[in-house]
Image: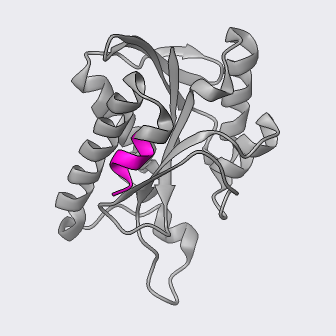
Amino acid sequence: MKWIVGLGNPGSEYAKTRHNVGFMALDALADRHHISINQSKCKALIGEGIIQGEKAVLIKPMTFMNLSGETVRAYMDYYKVALEDLIVVYDDMDTEVGKIRLRYQGSAGGHNGIKSIIQHTGTQQFNRIRMGVSRPEPGHAIVDYVLSNFPKKEKEALTSMIESTCDALEYAMKDTFERTMAKFNG
């Protein structure tokens, strides 16, 4: 079984923001596989289903980004799942819009959701898919930038990036994360 955590902020006002690409990717994956993400458990909305013949649990923390680790820890403790089976999907300003980057370890890189997960799991070693949102222009506040919607000119790159993320998640269901990284990090 794989458990996939998409990071974002709850609430319709955040639905289409850069910080919510993790939620967008999980929603798209759920649509592809007819999974409803509507069970309320472990401070999250959860959906369970079969992807590529394997059981998958899709998890959207409802704690707000900075407390995402609370959901990860609660799910781990309650269901006794292995950290090796976790994949976290989130926004990354060091990757350009439209691109994804897969890693199996590393620091939070200034991302508060990842910082919270590292704090609550006690390790930096977990699988991740970083979805590019690019950096703001100099002089723009980072918090305002990540909480802003994608402009029309980036819609095509956003859609393509969500599709690539879903493809990578599907591939990771049936193969190792190392091979998935080799295939999707291009």
Most common secondary structure along the magenta stretch = helix
Q: In the shown orientation, is residue 160 left or right of residue 118?
A: left
Does residue 182 show up magenta in the picture? yes
Give me the residue at 77% from left, 35% from top: 121
Give me the residue at 48% from left, 61% from top: 147
Does residue 46 show up magenta in the picture? no
What span is colored magenta in the figure? 180-186
Q: Nearer the viewer, residue 127 or 71?
A: 127
Residue 71, quarter of the rendered image: top right
Asked if residue 8 can be seen in this view, the reply is no
Q: Nearer the viewer, residue 181 or 89?
A: 181
Vertical comparison of 172 with 106: above or below: above
Residue 150, given in percent of the width and then of the height, sits at 31, 63
Q: Which of 19 and 4 is in front in this view?
A: 4
Vertical comparison of 96 with 123: above or below: below
Vertical comparison of 140 with 129: above or below: below
Q: In the shown orientation, is residue 43 left or right of residue 18?
A: right
Residue 48, quarter of the rendered image: top left
Residue 81, given in percent of the width and then of the height, sits at 66, 16
